[in-house]
Image: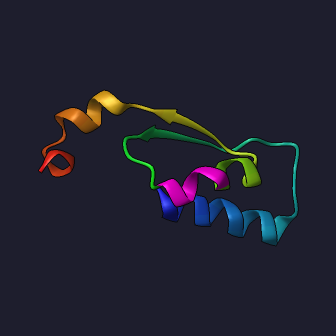
Amino acid sequence: MREALDAVEAARRANGRRDTRPHLAHLQVVHPDDIGRFRELGATANMQPLRARTSRRWTI
């Protein structure tokens, strides 16, 4: 997740702000520190919390 936001931020720096809204899909877990970055970068998220529930990696 954080790496995806870092990539969006790098693209914004390299190319300037455009009339686009990056969309990050299949998110399961977002660190609280990254939530505000979505707004700052103009990005949207497609959360899938049920997948996190069934993904053993996140339930241990």
Residue at 88 percent of width and 43 percent of height: 19
Q: Quadrant of residue 6?
A: bottom right
Residue at 50 percent of width and 54 percent of height: 32
Residue lying farthest to the top in this orientation: 50
Q: Position of residue 22 (x, y in %)?
A: 68, 45
Colouring method of the image: rainbow
Q: Is residue 27 above or below residue 32?
A: above
Q: What is the count of numbered marks?
A: 0
Q: Nearer the viewer, residue 45 or 39?
A: 39
Residue at 80 percent of width and 71 percent of height: 14
Q: Is residue 59 above or below residue 37?
A: above
In the rendered structure, the answer to whether residue 6 lies left or right of residue 57 reads right
In the rendered structure, the answer to whether residue 53 lies left or right of residue 42 reads left
Residue at 17 percent of width and 51 percent of height: 57
Q: Which residues are magenta?
A: 32-36
Q: Position of residue 4 (x, y in %)?
A: 54, 58
